[in-house]
Image: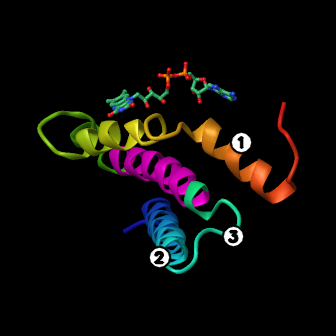
Amino acid sequence: MNQAIAFKLANMITQIDAARLLIWRASWLAKNGGYKNAEGSQSKYYASEMSVRVTEDAIQILGGYGYTREYPVERWHRDAKIHTIFEGTSEIQQLVIARAISGLRVE
Ligand SMILES: Cc1cc2nc3c(=O)[nH]c(=O)nc-3n(C[C@H](O)[C@H](O)[C@H](O)COP(=O)(O)OP(=O)(O)OC[C@H]3O[C@@H](n4cnc5c(N)ncnc54)[C@H](O)[C@@H]3O)c2cc1C
């Protein structure tokens, strides 16, 4: 494997693990007394955006095979994108997070 692919893979798995940890924290807090700030929004925002980036990188690594419908990766990318839109868009999650950590109204 060359470095171009190796660095991409290292970034991808690191982001996937970071998202997983944010989700586990949010889930633990939800079950044990509730969120302190906007941990649920943080996990939803990060995991959604991360899955778009990571599936796009996967397509790039695989080239044409990643893009065609013959293989599942392009489908994973389309499926990832909807998470930045439904159940609170990424922009709305950012508003919730910014309000929670600042206590300020965001115009
Ligand atoms: C496949 C699919 C399934 C869905 N399933 C359901 C469902 O089961 N139940 C349900 O109730 N809804 C569902 N929805 C609707 C979904 O929740 C909405 O599409 C989503 O909330 C975004 O609303 P909108 O499409 O009206 O976009 P808009 O609200 O018009 O937003 C357009 C863009 O502007 C941004 N934006 C909007 N307001 C602000 C602001 N104040 N500050 C900064 N940026 C802003 C948004 O982030 C977005 O990028 C579904 C949508 C899709 C595509």
Q: Is residue 88 left or right of residue 83?
A: right
Left or right of residue 25, residue 55 in this image: left
Quadrant location of the N terminus in the rendered image: bottom left
Residue 97 appears at what percent x and percent y?
71, 52
Q: Amino acid at mark 2?
A: Lys
**Magenta stretch holds residue 3:** no
Picture quadrant where residue 75 is located: top left
Q: Amino acid at mark 3?
A: Lys
Per the rendering, the mark at residue 31 is 2
Q: How many marks?
A: 3
- Of 36 and 94, the residue lying toward us: 36
Q: CA distance from mark 2 to mark 1?
A: 24 Å
Instruction: Characterize the magenta stretch by its predominant secondary structure.
Output: helix
Residue marked by disc 3: 36
Asked whether 7 or 11 is in front, the reply is: 11
Residue count near mark 3 (Cα–Cα under 10 Å), binned few <14, some 14–19, many ≥20:
few
User: Is 49 contained in the magenta span?
Assistant: yes
- Nearer-N-terminus badge (2/1): 2
Residue positioned 38% across, 49% down in the render:
55
Q: Is residue 95 left or right of residue 84?
A: right
User: To which residue does mark 1 refer?
Assistant: 95
Kindly report the distance in space between the C-alpha atoms of the residues bearing marks 3 and 1.
Answer: 16 Å
Q: Secondary structure at mark 1?
A: helix
Asked if ligand 1 lies within 8 A of label 1, the reply is: yes
Would you place residue 59 above or below residue 101 in this image? above
- SS at mark 2 in the image: helix
What residue sits 57% from the left and 77% below the top?
A: 33
Query: Which stretch is magenta?
Result: 42-60
Mark 2 or 1, closer to the camera:
2
